[in-house]
Image: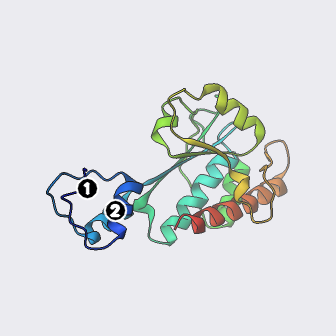
Amino acid sequence: AIFQDFAYSDPDSLALILIFKIPVARSRKASSEKLKNMAASCNKKILFVCLGNICRSPTSEVILRHLVKEKGEDEKWEIDSAGTGDWHVGKRPDKRTLQTLKKHGISTEHRARVVTSKDFNKFDIIFAFDESNIRDLKDIRPKAGKAELKLFGEWDPEGVTNVEDPYYGDIEGFDVMFEHCFRCCKAFLEHSK
């Protein structure tokens, strides 16, 4: 067996090897502490995807970045956002998105981009904001794509699974969207400990 000559300092070592697929060589000793550090250093790669990448997805991206930075864990995460449509590529988020973020003391230099087939192998989880986003993502997902495709609103403690697109509304819709995204980000982060 591959683990036969491997010395374990505690029973969690084998679980860490199996869960995180940490490679081990025969007759090589590794401490449990080293394995735990390797597991802790594994980056979590999250991509948020909405329609145009100027409202919901960049809002969630910067909220989650803000929350992980507050916890001192920003080195452990790779967080990005994209859109399924190309109307706003290279542009800053909607001015109402920026106003809403500013009210909460958050800023961003984000520029809109389109989700690519490579994203399905680069990221662990791709969060969509509504069923339309899910359908669009399934259409472009490569067969070998490894990323889990999830509805971000499933993390909402209030049970609102679709995060409404505020683009065609007024600033109040952006406030509602921010609060919804914040609740989901907070719940997701607490679960990801």
Amino acid type, label 2: Leu
Residue closest to the eye, 17 or 179: 17
Q: Which mark is residue 3?
A: 1
Judging from the image, what secondary structure is the residue with disc 1 in?
loop
Q: How many marks?
A: 2
Residue that label 2 marks: 14
Viewer-nearest residue: 178 or 104: 178
Give whichever of 77, 6 is nearer the camera: 6
In the picture provided, is 48 more to the left or to the right than 12?
A: right
Looking at the image, the residue that sits furthest to the left is: 27
Circle 1 Cα neighbour tier, 10 Å, few/some/many (<14 / 14–19 / ≥20) = some
At x 27%, y 50%, the residue is: 23
In this picture, residue 134 sits left or right of residue 141: right
What's the amino acid at mark 1? Answer: Phe
| Residue plotted at (61% across, 60% down) | 63
* SS under mark 2: helix
Q: Are marks 2 and 1 in contact (CB under 8 Å)?
A: yes
What colouring style does the render use?
rainbow
Q: Residues within 10 Å of mark 2 (few under 14, many from 20)?
A: some
Q: Can you say whether 190 is above or below 86 in the image?
A: below
Coordinates of residue 74 in the picture (x, y in percent): 44, 62
Q: Which quadrant of the structure image shows residue 182?
A: bottom right
Residue at the image point whose x is 30% and y is 73% from the top: 10
Q: Residue at x 62, y 62 (%)?
A: 188
For marks 2 and 1, give the CA distance: 8 Å
> Can residue 85 be seen?
no
Q: Which mark is residue 94?
A: none
Q: Earlier in the sequence, mark 2 or mark 1?
A: 1
Q: Position of residue 42 (x, y in %)?
A: 38, 56
Q: Position of residue 92 (x, y in %)?
A: 60, 43
Examine the rendering and report whether any part of residue 10 can be seen.
yes
Residue 184: name its quadrant.
Answer: bottom right
